[in-house]
């Protein structure tokens, strides 16, 4: 396991989100980190478990979608935080996202997910995501993630 502290653990340690919540013991508990290659985005790795399979040896598409969605959402939150020169990320939600499953994703291979900011405004970001297994592109996606304000049901979800 990566010994670094992820953006989720820093900014939302009590989150119960199925995909990215550190406090959800039944969830995926993804851990995203700043990219090491200088791109404006995040990177993560993930190892699937037996119950993440669609059929023997292959990862379920819904799990793949969740990985991309939550990782993209955190990429947007961190980018908006930087854009606005704030110390805490805004609570962001998915406005829309799409996933293209490019090839079967093998269970048992470490998944590498990279994200990159393609458009950024003070309250929203368009994010591109790619997922690799064994060096091959298995899925890619794009999403629009927006910061929500007080009164939205998700506003305090990371607290």
Image (cartoon, rainbow, N blue to C red):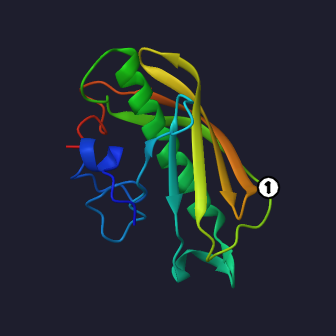
Q: Position of residue 20 (x, y in %)?
A: 39, 54
- Front residue of this view, candidates 128 and 61: 128
The quarter of the picture where the C terminus appears is top left
Q: Residue at x 64, y 71 (%)?
A: 59
Q: Can residue 99 be spotted in the picture?
A: no
Q: Residue at x 52, y 69 (%)?
A: 47
Q: Residue at x 41, y 23 (%)?
A: 80
| Picture layout, residue 49 above or below residue 80 | below
Could you tell whether 145 is left or right of 153 in the image? Answer: right
- Front residue of this view, candidates 129 and 146: 129
Q: Residues within 10 Å of mark 1 (few under 14, many from 20)?
A: few
The quarter of the picture where the N terminus appears is bottom left
Judging by the rendered image, the residue that carries numbered circle 1 is 102
Q: Secondary structure at mark 1?
A: loop
Could you tell whether 71 is left or right of 53 in the image? Answer: left
Q: Residue at x 30, y 24 (%)?
A: 149
- Front residue of this view, candidates 32 and 73: 32
Q: Residue furthest right?
A: 103
Q: How many discs appear?
A: 1
Could you tell whether 98 is left or right of 40 in the image? Answer: right
Q: Position of residue 100 (x, y in %)?
A: 74, 49
Q: Position of residue 78 (x, y in %)?
A: 39, 31
């Amino acid at each position: 396991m990566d010994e670094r502290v992820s953006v989720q653990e820093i900014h939302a340690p009590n989150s119960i989100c199925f995909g990215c919540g550190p406090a959800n013991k039944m969830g995926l508990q993804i851990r995203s980190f700043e990219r090491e290659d200088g791109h404006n985005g995040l990177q993560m790795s993930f190892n699937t478990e037996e119950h993440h399979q669609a059929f023997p040896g292959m990862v379920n598409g819904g799990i793949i979608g969740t990985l991309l969605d939550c990782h993209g959402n955190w990429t947007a939150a961190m980018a908006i935080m930087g854009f606005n020169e704030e110390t805490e990320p805004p609570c962001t939600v998915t406005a829309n996202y799409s996933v293209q499953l490019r090839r079967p994703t093998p269970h048992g291979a470490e998944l590498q997910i990279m994200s990159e900011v393609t458009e950024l405004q003070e309250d929203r970001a368009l994010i591109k995501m790619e997922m690799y297994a064994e060096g091959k592109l298995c899925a890619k996606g794009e999403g629009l993630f927006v910061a929500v304000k007080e009164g939205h049901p998700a506003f305090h979800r990371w607290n």
